[in-house]
Amino acid sequence: MTEIPAETEKAGFRSDVTVELVKHSAADSDVLWAARVSTAGEQSLEEITKDPERSKGLINFLMRDRHGSPFEHNSMTFFISAPIFVFREFMRHRVGWSYNEESGRYRRLEPVFYVPGEARKLVQQGRPGKYEFVEGTAAQHELTGRVMEDAYRHAYEAYQEMLAAGVAREVARSVLPVGLFSSMYATCNARSLMHFLGLRTQHEQAAVPSFPQREIEMVGEKMEAAWSRLMPLTHAAFNANGRVAP
């Protein structure tokens, strides 16, 4: 079947990402009953509300001494909208994660593309493994935005042309760049999220420095904000112990 794209459809450009917590079963109490079953058996659920300070101490102990399995008895599902290149980095995280992404085989992809905002550092200095990013000049920002937007428009016009000629979506999508926005559901537990955050965010309390690409860090920051509200004791212990996943 030949697709006839709307002639008036224009490319849109974004510099942000969006993260929505769509469902969850996650609380500090999930960590507590999972940990205390080793000593209290079936009575572990009764221990949860007895002594809040003792519960805080237990979570910190588990984090400090890296007893990780109690942090797996919970679940969070996020709906994420970000450039495709962010999702390709995401897929490096496999243990404790499940993903489902929108498909360019089964739907026509919308012309929404990533262009760095003014706060995005553009210039890389130094050698691999020991480099840093610094602010770009006004001319570099103007060039980046202009060239990227022009390339995106041409790519999407080619995509539309092939669709209009009856070329299959799964073939026509090959011309689209990784700056195209996509969306996916990502489900994880607190332990797998902590491992992700330890690698994909920079933080002053991190015992091990990380150097993530800014765009995936933007996603990580939004996920962490949602998680910190669900499991504040676990989040505090994560920070207090160097942001190393147990």
Image (cartoon, helix red, strand yellow):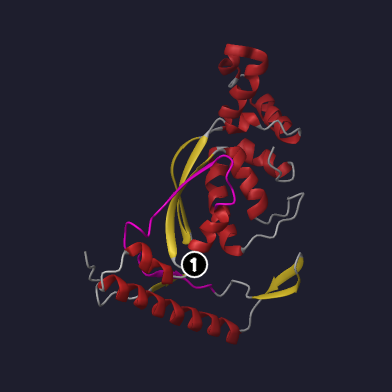
The 10 Å Cα crowd at callout 1, few under 14, some 14 to 19, many 20 or more, is some
Residue depicted at x 53% and y 73%: 117
Front position in the image: 27 or 92: 92
For residue 171, side relative to residue 210 (left or right): left
Q: Position of residue 210 (x, y in %)?
A: 71, 56
The reply to whether residue 181 is visible in this rendering is yes
Q: Indicate the quadrant where residue 96 lies.
A: top right
Where does the magenta region start and end?
91-117
| Left or right placement of residue 23 versus residue 37 in this view | left
126 with respect to 16 (left or right): right
Circle 1 sits in a helix, a strand or a loop, which is it? Answer: loop
On-image quarter of the N terminus: bottom left
Above-or-below relation of 58 to 119? above
The image quarter containing residue 73 is top right
Viewer-closest of 121 and 11? 11
Residue 34 place in picture, x, y as percent: 60, 24
Quarter of the view holding residue 239: top right
Name the residue at 25% across, 77% down.
Answer: 7
Q: Label 1 amino acid?
A: Val
Residue at 61 percent of width and 33 percent of height: 71
Q: Which residue is mark 1?
A: 178
- Which quadrant would the C terminus be assigned to in this image? top right
Residue 106 within the segment the image draws in magenta:
yes
